[in-house]
Image: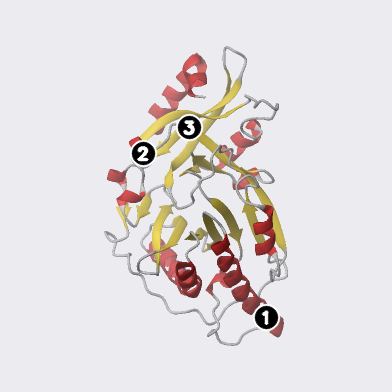
Amino acid sequence: MAQLLNDTIEAQLWAQDAITRLKAGNYGELVAGVVWTDARAEDGSLLVEAEPETMLRVLAREPLPILHGHDPGRPVGNVLEAALFQAPTGERFVAAILGHYTRDRILTFAELGLNDVTASQLSNLPEPTEEAWIQIASDPRDVSEAWVDEIAEDAPLPIVRTPLSHNSSDAWHELIRIGLPFALLVWNPAAKAFGTEVGKAVYAATYTWLKKAIESARERKAPLLCFESHQQGCQVTFLIRGNDVSLNYAAQEGLSQAAAQAARLVTLLAQRGMPASKLVYEIDAKALRWFPSYAVLDNGRIIASTPMLIASASELPAGLSLGLTRKDMGKAHQDKD
């Protein structure tokens, strides 16, 4: 798809102007790329299943993340601007300016003294609202419907299923995103009594349901469970990789404590004048404990557990594909394959 940009003078001039105007800032480099084309596969379907006008409206609201291999734990940068063009051959395409993180621009949690944040288990939690629900999102080409059915079974709240579109020829993992209210992640069996009996039952049932969902990964080949929520305006994500039983057991047992720590870390960053828009936790396979993998601040800067989390330019494949939510383009992710 890069050839489309090279062959279209208007797109080249737009890209040159945008890169000069934007400047690198928090990114190590700015590059131009093609993120959508109306090229079609042999069966007549679009190679990238998205409406370009809708895509441009999403990108106009805010920068959207670029991920390595559709992996929520492997940030590459952000799509900063985009525009629609037509190549001399007649093919329509969306060109974009991509801001790539580089290791020399990365802050670490250790440098900020935030690599070992502690927090007490929260005991007083809000009553679950009647509008509360759980979202399960996956690409049906990467994840079997049977596994999604297994996870959705006996859910304590209404389930909303959202198909993703990674547009990737090779799936690196079986990614399922599960979105739910933050308080449900924090609850643990030691929490004090509160609210109504119905509310208590929802919390307890969610704890059991999350345990079952995590345990179901042991039957998968390359599972990646992504639990997502929001706290103080920040998207907080907890990633569980692989099918190792002991690792997944430790992840489930420590999830509520990790959620409490994440809430504390979001607060500390805000108090330092560094409010975060995204915070991602992972489980350490050796230590069997949760740790903050990276955070993206409101100003676009990234903090990571280690600069090595960010792939170097030589490690990144050349192609760019979009991991788009088919039902809601507003929840789109731009992913590096």
Q: Nearer the viewer, residue 289 or 258?
A: 289
> At 69% across and 71% down in the image, what residue appears?
156
Disc 2 and disc 1: Cα gap in Å?
Answer: 48 Å
Q: Do labels 2 and 1 touch, CB within 8 Å?
A: no
Q: Are marks 3 and 2 in contact (CB under 8 Å)?
A: no
**Amino acid type, residue under disc 3 in the picture:** Gly
The secondary structure type at the circle numbered 2 is helix
Q: Position of residue 5 (x, y in %)?
A: 49, 20
Closer to us: 273 or 269: 269
**Is 57 placed left or right of 295 in the picture?**
right
Q: Which mark is residue 35?
A: none
Instruction: Assign a secondary structure to mark 1.
Output: helix
- Asked whether residue 23 is in view, the answer is no
- Residue type at numbered disc 2: Glu
Q: Label 1 vs label 3: CA separation?
A: 47 Å
Tell me where residue 168 appears, x and y as whole percent: 56, 38
Determine whether, in the image, residue 253 is placed left or right of residue 209: left
Within 10 Å of disc 1 (Cα), the crowding (few <14, some 14-19, many 20+) is few
The answer to whether residue 143 is left or right of residue 13 is right
Neighbour class for label 2 at 10 Å: few (<14), some, many (≥20)?
Answer: few
Seen at 59% across and 40% down, the residue is 58
| Residue drawn 63% across the image and 44% down it | 141
Residue with the mark numbered 2: 315
Q: Is residue 252 visible?
A: yes
Q: What residue is shown with label 3? A: 319
Q: Nearer the viewer, mark 1 or mark 3?
A: 3
Query: Nearer the N terminus, badge 2 or badge 1?
Result: 1
Instruction: Quote the CA–CA distance across marks 3 and 2.
Output: 12 Å
Kind of residue at badge 1? Ala
> Is 197 or 246 nearer to us in this picture?
246
Residue to which mark 1 is pinned: 201
Extreme-bottom residue of the structure: 193
